[in-house]
Amino acid sequence: MLKLEHQTLNDRAYGALKQELISGGFSPGQTLVIRKLAETFGISTTPIREALQRLVAERLLEMQNNRSIIVPLLSEPAFEELTRIRIAVEGLAGEMAATRMGESALIDIQAALAGMQRAIEAGDAKAYLALNEAFHFAIYRHAGAPILLNMIHDLWGRVGPYLKLLMQADRYIPQSNDAHLRIVAALERRDGLAVQASLAEDIAVAAAILSENLRAAH
């Protein structure tokens, strides 16, 4: 019984830390301090330590020579590779979801889109990023492909820390919902190929701006 409880805590810690990566709660290059994380999530240090080691093994986090654990800094070639994989994998999930989702799922996606537009108008970057994540995963969950969904979670775990940099890019914000509008229109038509193409555009436009940040940082 105690062992099961311990395992549950480990999973809880792992899930919480991975979600922070996906949602941009951590910054690129940030050092993760076990005691501080334990306080933040209300979990003891042992499950946090084991969750960090698991994320290091998955290469979502990186262990330094001094044994400290950081959020990886992506090189420009690594970011370019990640972008190409995201376009292929997330595009496939969108294409599959287009013909499988019901009306209630489409309503949720439309609501997320409307919320993102309000967040842009209000200048609320945090709300926009949360709704952007909800928007994308509401689509991907309806692909009916759990292996694919797990792959996308891992990809977002790598790119998530960089996404909040988008909302600091003045030229991105006005166009940040353009591809989303086309994605929703294609979903309404059940046009899988158009969903795939618009998702590819959404990822590529954001990546082009983030690549400029990476070049400036190096």
Image (cartoon, helix red, strand yellow):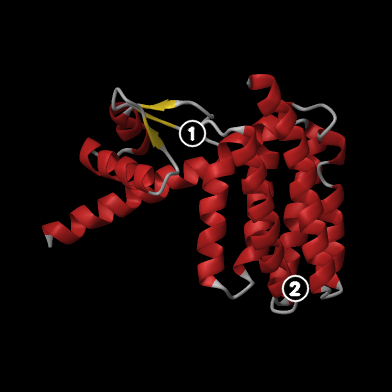
Secondary structure category for the residue under label 1: loop
- Whole-percent x and y of residue 130? 63, 44
In front of the other: 106 or 182: 182
In whole angstroms, how far apart are the C-alphas of marks 1 and 2? 34 Å
- Residue 115 appears in view: no
Which residue is under mark 2? 98
Residue 25 vs residue 184: left or right? left
> Image quadrant of residue 123?
top right
> What amino acid type should be assigned to the residue bearing mark 1?
Pro
The total of numbered circles placed on residues is 2
Dot label at residue 72: 1
Circle 1 or circle 2, nearest the eye: 1
Residue 48 vs residue 157: left or right? left
> What amino acid type should be assigned to the residue bearing mark 2?
Ala
- Whole-percent x and y of residue 48? 29, 40
Secondary structure category for the residue under label 2: helix
- Whole-percent x and y of residue 152? 57, 57
Contact (CB < 8 A) between labels 1 and 2? no
Q: Which numbered disc, 1 or 2, marks the residue that appears first in the sequence?
A: 1
